[in-house]
Amino acid sequence: MKLYDYVLSPSCYKVRLMAALAGVKLDIWPVDFHPGAEHRGPELMALNPAGSIPIFEDGDLVLTESSAMLVYLAAKAAQQWLGNDTAMPAARVQQWLSFSHRLTASLGAARLHEMLLRPGNIDALRGQGTVALRELEAGLIEQRIRGQNFLASDRPTVADIACFPYVALAPDGGVSLDPYPAIRLWSRAVRSLDGFIEMPGIHRLHELKPEPGPEGGEA
Amino acid sequence: MTRNAMMDEWYPVGLVSQLDAHGRSTALMGEPIEVKRGDDGTATVARSDGRHLPVCIRYGHVWSSLGDPQKPLFAIPEADQPGRRLVDVGVVRVRCSPLRAVENFLDIAHFPFVHTDILGSEPHTEVQNYKVEIREDEDEVWATQVRFYQPQAAKSAEGGITTEYMYRVPAPTCSILYKTCPPRPGEWDVITLFVQPLAEDLCDVWPWMALFDDETPMTDLIHFQQTIFVQDRSILENQIPGLLPLDPGMEIPTRADLTSVAYRRWLKRHGYTYGAQLVAQ
């Protein structure tokens, strides 16, 4: 399985992360997205007329949408990540997979504007990103009331991986995550998963030391 | 205003490889400027009132100045050695003081925590003693005999090695790092951080490299350095205070921070205070 990849792209990271969590080895092809704009060159435009990355190949199969890549990897190697055992989680997975595009178009575009100087109306992008974050926060709070720690079910699914990167990197675009406690707890839960890998801007969890104080040993 | 001292310095304002006739609108210390390729094919930099600014083409970048540079741009003799690969890493914008960006580049102690398993790893966190001086003849800050254990020091490094470094600050917003070169012992890889000050709390950072490495694809070299720098970016955007304090009081340096102490002292001596705060608040 071959991934046309850019190390700073959250959409590419989704695929790398899903593959790592599913124990799948990818053949990584680095694309000079910045500063070279190789994704807009003739070779990659022929493969993906949308001019975006990631691009995923497995034999004759070519995928250009990251959500499809997540589903393919899960179906091949980690079916519990599909979350489609009953109607409710199956529908919620689809809901959040589609929703993830709004995160890309708002928080992702704000990040590209602030970090790599791509054009865009930064105030509008941040505003749209904030609306999406509020919706995600509400969804995660409802899930917690149901006793579930992840977006679509009581276990992580492709929906979590589709939404996690652009949310975790929102501060790169100047959108703070401070107002969203449920999102921060969820981000911790994702980063605690066995096999989790990081990307620049998303740090791994460092081991927690015991709290100082009467119960925690030496003060 | 003491900030005039920084007005006469050279700053990077664009990549030579991306110059075009359409131009790039950017800024230098709060002044809007336009960088483009003129009709005769050479680079021009102009203020919004049309006044042309000095231009210098060097190290893959277009350099300019709002003032009247008294010296040519600093030399990097190693960069002209034949056989080196010259790597345009590309711009990354950071909402931080341009001086903070340079200071972070000079710091070694954060490697195991921010660049985990690449430039450092726990428990190898100790910064051994190294030498720091302000070289009076060159008027530059130098740190030498810096050694650090690194799991993957460069794209061309296989496995962990103790890497030796030298750091050099030849201009207030530029730093050059000389680093052990795994494929060519005896030579130094050159890794630079050229910082364009847009405002006192905003900068465009242009990393650039001159490496002995005939194996690694160019894209991998670019991605390695972008990975390192973007790992730093979120840290830089959250430093408090935002402006670099040049007077003691707000931050307590440790022995590992000797380079930073010398850098701040050198900045203060020259009145290089754009992006700095002088009295601790």
Image (cartoon, rainbow, N blue to C red):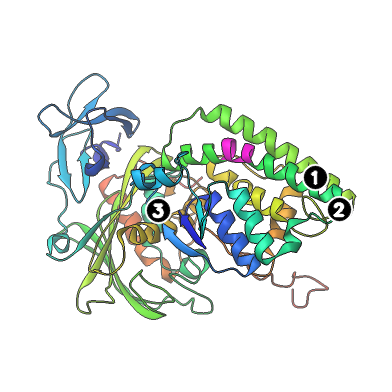
Classified by dominant secondary structure, the portion drawn in magenta counts as helix
Q: Residue at x 55, y 41 (%)?
A: A108
* Amino acid identity at mark 1: Ala
- What x and y, as percent, mark residue A155? 79, 60
Please give the chain letter of the residue carrying mark 3: A
Residue toward you, B45 or B227: B227
As for residue A102 lying within the magenta part, the answer is yes
At label 2, the amino acid type is Thr
Q: Which mark is residue A31?
A: 3
Query: Helix, strand or loop at disc 2?
Result: loop
Count of numbered labels shown in the rendering: 3
- The residue singled out by tag 2 in the image is A86
B241 relative position to B91: left or right? right
Disc 1 versus disc 2: distance between alpha carbons?
9 Å
Q: Position of residue A132 (x, y in %)?
A: 68, 36
Q: Chain of mark 1?
A: A
Left or right of residue B177, residue B275 in this image: right
